[in-house]
Amino acid sequence: MNTKVKKTNTLLKTVVASVALGVLTLLPLQQATAEDKIRWKVQSSFNTGWPALGDPIAYLAKTLDAATDGRIKLKVFEPGKIVPALEITPSISAGDLPAAYNYMAYDQGRIPSAVLFSAVPFGMEPWEYAAWWFEGEGATLAQEIYHKSNVHPLLCSTIGPETAGWYRKPIEQLSDLEGLKIRFSGLGGMVLNKIGASATLMAGGEIFAALEKGTLDATEYSMPAIDEVLGFHKIAKFNLFPGWHQVSTSTHLMINLDKWNALSKADQALFEMGCTAATMRAITTGEALQGAQINSFKDKGVTAMTLPDDVIAELKRVSAIVMEEESAKDADFKRVWESQQAFHAEYQVWKEIGYLPRNFK
């Protein structure tokens, strides 16, 4: 074999070896890239078209898709499309559903403390709740409680107060609430039952028909801009304020714990950042819409009314009784409630002297 042929063979071997090495080097990278793709079905508790309450999960899905150039894609399903609202957490726990944008209060029957992470009568305003969640014990307590059910929770939305409800007649004294068939959720419903109303929990899509048929005398659901979508103003012409029973409403991204632990630290951080951003946008969207909505009441024949001070005082008194009773029934409920009270007491010192009062002319 002449020298020229030997050199050619040597060169070919070198090229083949280099290509082979390159393929072997790229193969794990390609496999890792394929393995790192996340394709999750996500059930939502709220319609994704509802501003601030429902659209944070759509915002999260869009953000993660854009930030990862399509590597993380969440396919969001509207309420009830995969499982009923009350079956969301068991489905995540079992691994049948990877994740959900869920209202924890729906777990109240199986996890009594869950309702405290959603809404509390005379409780925290949205920015205070967010402070408790991120800077206080909120996230730690929620994780401790939900990890026992193989679920990892992330705060993904918190918004301002609901209204105190939509009524056919004005509420001018506590006795006006007695005997009313009213849609009220969570702890607020317990309070109303104690003062003689008949509170029931009903899905948002069912409320209008129940009002129309007279099955309900009154209802609450959310902030005015969201209630507008549901059409309550067409039947009940008195919208009461303030939302004593739900000073803030918080919704969480709940992920199967095994799937969460299987994520890389980088992907966990992406989900946490995405949900934190969605929470901020929920607050800003919710706060931006309500003034214009209330200003539109006059043209619709709706009267915005404020509950009398003595009615609010009595509702607060009865709320304290309910919280004490529920704390006595469940250790986790007691632990979370005491944490919220302690945080609120310290925060209130700052709020009362740090912020400019708004009662000046």
Image (cartoon, helix red, strand yellow):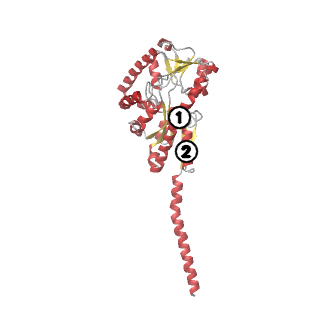
Is residue 331 shown left or right of residue 99?
A: left
Residue 354 image point, x, y percent: 41, 30
Residue type (three-letter) at the residue carrying disc 2? Thr
Q: Residues within 10 Å of mark 2 (few under 14, many from 20)?
A: many
The residue to which callout 1 is attached is 284
In the picture, the quarter occupied by the N terminus is: bottom right
Using the rendered image of the protein, determine whether residue 204 is visible from the camera's viewpoint: no
Residue 27 image point, x, y percent: 53, 62
Q: Which of 280 and 178 is in front in this view?
A: 280
Residue 127 image point, x, y percent: 46, 33
Residue 203 occupies which quadrant of the picture? top right
How many angstroms separate mark 1 from mark 2 (CA)?
17 Å
Residue type (three-letter) at the residue carrying disc 1? Thr
What secondary structure is marked by label 1?
helix
The residue to which callout 2 is attached is 63
Of labels 1 and 2, the one closer to you: 1
The image shows residue 205, relative to residue 197, as above or below, that is below
Q: Which of 59 and 181 is in front in this view?
A: 59
Q: Residue 60 carries which label?
A: none
Of the two numbered discs 1 and 2 on the same chain, state the one appearing first in sequence: 2
Residue at image location 53% in from the left, 72% down from the top: 17
